[in-house]
């Protein structure tokens, strides 16, 4: 038992295990994720409704979203952004890994008599003849990717943005990293049954990788007949680090903002946003 707990608590090598697809596609977890997306008061899977409205107001205004504008939402979830953009007249494509979220998004579009193209696609490998004027990634998904994932994503963005187009996204900041504390928690049914509909024991370890400014929440979930690990890696950026990474990927025209409502950059805030032009 002591040895097992020692192994369980050992700090994993940086990006040793990436579990993003499992997190979003597991049948039980994706149902709990969808409920979190749709909770208007929660900032868990989507931003809370009031804030997301402000985000979309700003995007629609700043990028002149109207009939004919071609927009892609990478990691569109249940379609909270895509639906608003389609209502503004844009020609919208939403990409996501989660069939459950896409199912909700499709029903939402149908009920609102809107035409939105939904694709169950990994945005790291997505290739299409379609080209966009605007590509969005809302809620800091960029930070959940390991370095090779971020490079792959930027490649996808480059291939699908038309000249003059913009890639708009937000990230976790260095100020948010300063608040991360290492911890180890244990609970039967950790997080109120979030990880399984069967009885389980859950361990959560939070680690800081200070040099790389990365945090990890590692969940070990033990059921009677299976053990699973879920890793939530978050790379936190300074504007200089993000700008340098974007420049390396060939994106030189970068505007740094406070967030996706267009506020000015604030070094104390937990996140910031970038508008990248090609
Ligand atoms: C934090 S949620 C944000 C959802 C949406 N942007 C919003 O603000 O409501 C991240 C979404 O990205 C999706 N996702 C994660 N990795 C992905 C990938 N590699 N390709 C496509 N979708 C992905 C997840 O399924 C999830 O719906």
Image (cartoon, rainbow, N blue to C red):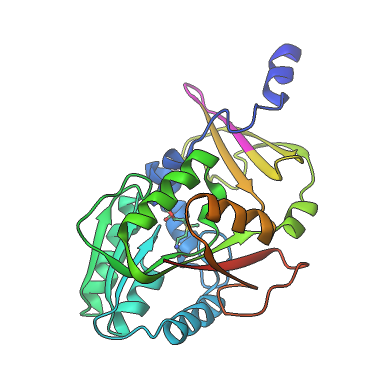
Residue drawn at (43%, 38%) of the image:
22
Horizontal and vertical percent for residue 54? 53, 82
Residue extent of the magenta highlight: 218-227
Residue 225 falls inside the magenta stretch: yes
**Relative height, residue 262 to residue 12 (above, below):** below
- In this picture, residue 54 sits left or right of residue 258: left
**Relative height, residue 130 to residue 258 (above, below):** above
Residue drawn at (45%, 87%) of the image:
61
Q: How many labels does the image show?
A: 0
Front-most of 152 and 178?
A: 152
Horizontal and vertical percent for residue 27? 37, 43
**Relative height, residue 225 to residue 101 (above, below):** above
Front-most of 192 and 20?
A: 20
Image quadrant of residue 266?
bottom right
Residue drawn at (51%, 35%) of the image:
18
**Relative height, residue 91 to residue 45 (above, below):** below
Residue 252 falls inside the magenta stretch: no
- In this picture, residue 221 sits left or right of residue 165: right
Horizontal and vertical percent for residue 122? 34, 47
Front-most of 222 and 68?
A: 68
How would you classify the magenta stretch by its main secondary structure?
Answer: strand
Quadrant of the rendered image holding ligand 1: bottom left
Quadrant location of the C terminus in the rendered image: bottom left
């Amino acid at each position: 038992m002591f040895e097992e707990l020692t192994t369980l608590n050992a700090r994993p090598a940086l990006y040793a295990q990436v579990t993003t697809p499992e997190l979003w596609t597991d049948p039980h977890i994706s149902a709990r994720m969808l409920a979190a997306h749709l909770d208007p008061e929660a900032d868990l899977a989507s931003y809370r409704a009031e804030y997301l409205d402000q985000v979309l107001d700003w995007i629609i205004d700043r990028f002149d979203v109207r009939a004919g504008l071609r927009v892609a939402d990478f990691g569109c979830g249940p379609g909270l952004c895509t639906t608003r953009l389609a209502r503004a007249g844009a020609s919208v494509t939403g990409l996501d890994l989660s069939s459950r979220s896409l199912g909700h998004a499709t029903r939402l579009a149908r009920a609102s008599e809107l035409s939105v193209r939904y694709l169950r696609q990994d945005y790291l490998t997505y290739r299409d003849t379609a080209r966009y004027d605007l590509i969005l990634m809302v809620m800091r998904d960029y930070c959940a990717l390991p370095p090779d994932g971020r490079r792959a994503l930027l490649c996808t963005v480059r291939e699908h943005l038309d000249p003059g187009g913009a890639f708009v996204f937000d990230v976790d900041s260095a100020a948010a990293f300063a608040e991360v504390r290492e911890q180890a928690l244990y609970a039967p049914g950790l997080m109120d049954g979030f990880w399984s509909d069967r009885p389980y024991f859950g361990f959560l370890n939070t680690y800081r990788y200070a040099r790389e400014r990365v945090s990890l929440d590692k969940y070990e979930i033990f059921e009677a007949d299976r053990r699973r690990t879920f890793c939530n890696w978050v790379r936190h950026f300074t504007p200089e680090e993000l700008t340098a990474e974007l420049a390396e990927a060939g994106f030189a025209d970068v505007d740094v903002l406070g967030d996706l409502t267009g506020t000015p950059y604030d070094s104390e805030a937990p996140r910031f946003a970038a508008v990248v032009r090609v």
